[in-house]
Image (cartoon, rainbow, N blue to C red):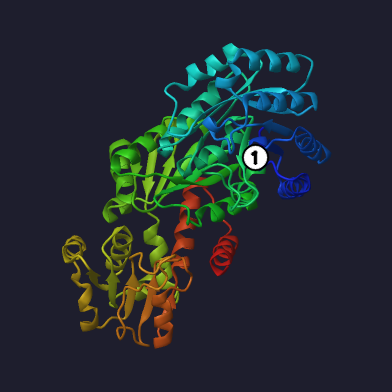
Amino acid sequence: MTYLAVSIFACEPGEFAEKVSNAKRIGAEAIEIRCDALAEPNIDAILKMIHSVQKCKLPVIVTCRDVSEGGVNPVDFSVRLSILKQAVEAKADFVDVEYENFKHPDTHSVLKAALETSDTKLILSCHNFKGPFDDLNILYETVLALHPDAIPKIVYKARHISDCFAAFDLLQEADRPLIAFCMGEDGLVSRALAKKFGSVLTFACLDDAAQTAPGQVSVQTMKQMYRWDAIDKDTEIFGVIGDPVGHSLSPALFNQSFEKKNINAVYLPFLVRGGNDEFNTFLDDACNRYKLGFGGFSVTLPHKTNALNYANRHGDYVDTLAQTIGSVNTLKIGFNGLISAYNTDYAGAMDAMASVFDGDRHSLHGKKVAVIGAGGVSRAVVAGLVDVGARVRIYNRTLSKAESLAKEFCCKFAGINELTEHTADVVVNCTSLGMCPDVETCPVPEGVLTEQMTVFDTVYNPLETKLLQMAKAAGAKTVNGAEMFIRQAMAQYKIYIGDDPDEELMRKVVYDKLGS
């Protein structure tokens, strides 16, 4: 079993008991008591805290962390040892002591003697707050050599998401109970996947304001967003690759869709920092471990071109449309880790725009369309519009980018300052201007929009951007980015699962999230 544990800093017993009760109510599966949070640890108070957890019938972990490994307050060595010994005598389920301190003869002899007549399990912790350990396998074996019945706890800061794979590998190869995950934002997925890979426990916080370590998320997020209760060793892994990626609605959208269809899968945010090399390293790591259940990824900024390049070099199949557009937003990992690559932005954008014109893409034929931006989303939109015979002009701040994209798709181009000089039937924003949190920005100056226009903003957060507010004020028809997002996600789901999703559910999830 993998416990979803909440670490509670030791405090006044009444307050502590209330926090324990709240933790159980929201779904915590174990409680860690951080005795080092007390300026002057009091054994009687700590024993009351242990009994509070036991009264709630939750497993209790007791630690008095050394400041060298993240402790809050410096606590004398002899006091820390006494707390752990009495926790064993109080029948705590686990006591956690630093491996480096357990090597001390006094610690080793005192705790070993107490544990011999107890069912309490010993966790020997190794923390590295700067980065990965040199060799996890050697460290694992070294910890067990000191105390074979211990549960090694190996936790380190992920400098990049690819650092998580060493923890996954160790968990798969270990022949004894083990705790292993990564700290930091780059290590979030290792916490969320701890149950799949068999870590004895992982940590979550009571709420987002109560983190006790970098990279923690709340119990509610783990349970409701990341499907903690449904995860097992056979769960297939999907996710969205991007930087930033924490704002994405995709995890909520896909995980609720998996839940509705009773599919054993989870969808997570994969923060992949860096450029082409870092992206390649991550995908190599995931594809080489396809047997662990990596099934595929959505790809967002800034990696859509990197995804196409990777698929062209290592892929089994690249969709012709993705090749034409020059970017990939969907990767499916198949047998032997072979990649198939697609672009569903095209279908999402075209269907969203066509929804205003009786749902027929070809109703855009002959219409004058102003496309703002010359990035990855613009490529998909322009490719679709040209394909149905729209008269496209691309506007961009960097004129050379607009010119390059226009030449590729045989359409017109202009600088962003020329928007006021041309008329258009449809205006499409393909930039990130107006995206949360910069909601007051807008790609179109005053006076451009008219009531004869249809205005489509590919930004979906917020649901009504500054551009769409201006369009409504001018009397224009509007299409929000949520429509494109939902439709491209539906296409992705079918690629991943081989079946259609519940469109009504997807629409509800997105609009509920954005509406709130």
Vertical position of residue 302 compared to residue 392: above or below: above
Q: Furthest-right residue in view?
A: 55
Residue plotted at (47% across, 57% down): 247
Report whether residue 487 is seen: yes
Q: Is residue 500 visible?
A: no
Q: Mark 1 points at which residue?
A: 39
Residue 53 percent across, percent down from the top left: 78, 39
Q: Which of 137 and 16 is in front in this view?
A: 16
Q: Is residue 404 above or below residue 443?
A: above
Direction from residue 484 to residue 127 in the image, left or right: right
Residue pictured at 68% horizontal, 37% vertical: 40
State which quadrant residue 197 falls in: top right
**What secondary structure is marked by label 1?**
loop
Residue 484 point in image, percent of width and height: 44, 65
* Left or right: 401, with 321 as reference point: left
In front: 470, or 318? 470
Which quarter of the rendered picture does the N terminus lie within? top right
Q: Name the spot of residue 93 as percent of width and height, x first.
A: 74, 28
